[in-house]
Amino acid sequence: MRKGNAAKNQIREEYGNTPLWKRLLGSDKIGLIAALIIVIVVFSILTDGLFISKSNIINILIASSIVGMVVIGECYLIITAHVDLSPGSVAAFSGVFMSLLLRNGIPLFIAMIIVICGGLCIGFLNSLLVNKLKLEAFIATLATMSIFRGLAFIICGGKAVFVTNDLFLKLGSGRVAGIPIPVIIFIISFSIFMIVLSRTRFGRNVYMVGGNATAARLAGINAQKLRTKIYMMTSAFAALGGIIQAGRMSSGQPSTSEGLEFDAVTAVVLGGVAMLGGVGTLSGALIGLFIMQGFNNGLMMLNVPSFWQTVSRGLLLITALSFDYIRNRRRKLGA
């Protein structure tokens, strides 16, 4: 029960009544914030200030909102010591599926419900492979990643499905009070699920299952049922991200969102969530998300060739995993 109690204590420490500045100075997030500031300063200098222009900040926020949908689910999953590699394919499949439904006259709201329910079903499939067939999460979701990427190409014949539905296009590119709609959707989703993770019994159970599965079972927590819900949540968020992405592009394209899951995992681990489970917060994952997206955006602004950007993202993932390894060693030495 020690790890479960440690998880509860971590939540209390982060979201207690302590002033925000004291909490930041006394947590690992000061290093993350310093890294984010370094990214901002370096790319601002290299781009003559264009990096921090209003238009570019909005671009970063929009890109962060789409990846951020998946970050929410991956954060929950990784805290339970699991991972999902299928969100990029689920997003592409959902974007194409959504576009096909609209092309065939299905109303926007109904089409969105159908596609998000489809995402829930994919998440349930992932959980069955892990819970019932006892496949490793990495292998099971790697398989579904391939399956749904292939299905995305099959259902549209390998061609983009263009859409002219005005409401759908506004969902991806519209603004309310000057704020892009994708950013508003992400802020609302993030806020809700941060409260769930930090303030509810479900959130405490997530930490307990990841910190000590045996102790969680003895405490009456059904780990398989809990993980099933999180897998479903992750795929539903991926489907929502795919819908928004299709709205931004005015079409469903089967080749989009490649590497989305790796960007999400990189952001989560970079934000201090332990791959071994039981440790981490959504607020840390959010900072990790901004570091990663700022890094990617800066490379694009500097016109770094796309293949070198791919190499850089891989190096960033290795860096995040290295930090995770160092943090885990420190925790073991301090235990």
Image: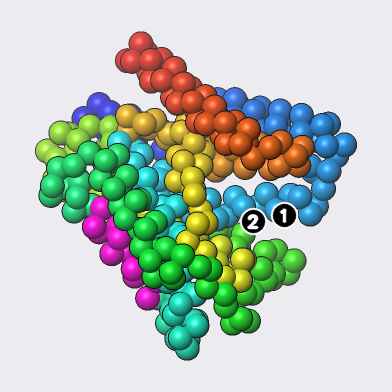
Of all residues shown, which one is farthest toward the bottom? Answer: 105
Q: Are marks 1 and 2 in contact (CB under 8 Å)?
A: yes
**Mark 2 belongs to which amino acid?**
Ile
Horizontal side of residue 128 vs 299, given as left or right: left
Q: Residue at x 80, y 52 (%)?
A: 54
- For the magenta stretch, what is the residue range? 114-126
Up the image or down, 228 lies above or below 9; here it is: below
Q: Where is residue 71 in the image (x, y as percent from the top left)?
A: 47, 47
Q: Position of residue 141 (x, y in %)?
A: 30, 47
Q: Can residue 143 be seen in this view?
A: yes
Horizontal side of residue 250 vs 210, given as left or right: right
Q: Residue at x 12, y 49 (%)?
A: 132
**Mark 1 belongs to which amino acid?**
Ile
Up the image or down, 114 lies above or below 61; here it is: below
Horizontal side of residue 292 vs 56, given as left or right: left
The total of numbered circles placed on residues is 2
Q: Does the magenta-highlighted stretch encompass residue 117?
A: yes
Up the image or down, 193 lies above or below 95; here it is: above
Q: Where is residue 175 in the image (x, y as percent from the top left)?
A: 69, 69
Q: Which residue is drawn at 49% across and 81% down?
A: 102
Q: Identify the secondary structure beneath mark 2.
A: helix
Task: Specify the principal SS of the magenta part.
Answer: helix
Of all residues shown, which one is farthest toward the right? Answer: 48
Location of residue 281 (image quadrant): top left
Q: Which residue is drawn at 31% across and 55% down?
A: 147
Q: Which mark is residue 58?
A: 1
User: Viewer-proximal residue, 319 or 226?
Assistant: 319
**Residue of label 2:** 62
Q: Residues within 10 Å of mark 2 (few under 14, many from 20)?
A: many
Q: Residues within 10 Å of mark 1 (few under 14, many from 20)?
A: some
State the separation of the CA atoms marked 1 and 2. 6 Å
Q: Does the magenta-highlighted stretch encompass residue 189?
A: no
